[in-house]
Image (spheres, rainbow, N blue to C red):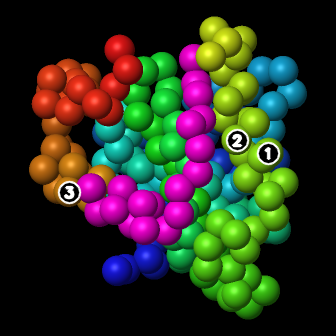
């Protein structure tokens, strides 16, 4: 199965600014400043050709020592995924490793990256919206490459089928047809 993807970086590692790609405008906009000194633990972006159940492009955490600028595209290898629910909607984060860094060539699965990195990422996404309501986001765990590739494929199909649909309509329709992807 194909595990090479192109990731569009929205947010740099260590940033406290939440940048977000706006599909309608076709550009990256500043959504907000994170509260409580939270900073993104990893470079964060999306996959253009894949639509997640929350109505946005499928999110990706890119494992790398480097800090990539918002708006750039890079090649990455999918190595796993983090399963997450945000305000009742499935909001999976694929985990990928930068594919054009010679130092990362041997990394091909979640077992190859430091446990601390995964713990930091899990902790961030479990708590960064606590100011809104504790528990609004939850992380149910990590999955390996096979699960992640299936998820990628499923989201590519969603984009092909529903990419032109308005976000609210899409979520409304999916809640009826795929209730297992939503908790409320
Ligand atoms: Mg998302």
Give the distance between the C-alpha atoms of the residues marked 2 and 1, in whole angstroms: 5 Å
Q: Is residue 157 above or below residue 32?
A: below
In terms of image quadrants, where is residue 74?
A: bottom right
Does the magenta portion include 138? Answer: yes
- For the point 70% across and 87% down, the residue is 106
What mark, if any, has residue 130 been given in the picture? none
Residue 14 visible? The answer is yes
Q: Nearer the viewer, residue 4 or 29?
A: 4
Quadrant (top left, top right, bottom left, bottom right) of the C terminus: top left
Q: Name the residue tied to disc 2.
A: 122
Marks 3 and 2: CB-CB under 8 Å?
no
Per the model, the C-alpha gap separating discs 3 and 2 is: 27 Å
Of badges 3 and 2, the one in the foreground is 2
Queried on whether the Cβ of the residue with tag 2 lies below 8 angstroms from ligand 1, the answer reads no
Disc 1 target residue: 120
Instruction: Give how far apart the Cα atoms at labels 1 and 3 are.
Output: 31 Å
Mark 2: give few (<14), some (14-19) or many (20+) Cα within 10 Å: many
**Label 3, on which residue?**
157
Residues shaded magenta: 136-154
Q: What element does badge 1 sit on?
A: helix
Q: Is residue 10 above or below residue 55?
A: below
Of the two numbered discs 1 and 3 on the same chain, state the one appearing first in sequence. Answer: 1
């Amino acid at each position: 199965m194909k595990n090479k993807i192109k990731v569009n970086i929205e947010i740099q590692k260590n940033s406290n600014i939440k940048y977000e790609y706006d599909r309608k405008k076709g550009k990256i906009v500043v959504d907000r400043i994170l509260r409580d000194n939270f900073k993104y633990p990893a470079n964060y972006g999306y996959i253009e050709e894949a639509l997640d159940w929350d109505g946005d492009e499928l999110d990706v955490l890119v494992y790398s020592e480097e800090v990539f600028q918002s708006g750039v595209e890079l090649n990455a290898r999918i190595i796993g995924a983090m399963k997450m629910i945000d305000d009742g909607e499935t909001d999976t984060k694929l985990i990928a490793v930068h594919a054009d860094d010679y130092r990362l060539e041997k990394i091909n699965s979640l077992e190859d990256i430091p446990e601390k990195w995964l713990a930091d990422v899990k902790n961030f996404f479990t708590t960064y919206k606590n100011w809104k309501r504790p528990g609004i986001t939850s992380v149910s765990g990590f999955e390996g490459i096979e699960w992640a590739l299936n998820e990628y494929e499923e989201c590519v199909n969603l984009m092909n089928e529903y990419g032109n649909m308005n976000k609210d309509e899409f979520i409304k329709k999916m809640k009826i047809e795929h209730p297992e992807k939503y908790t409320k």
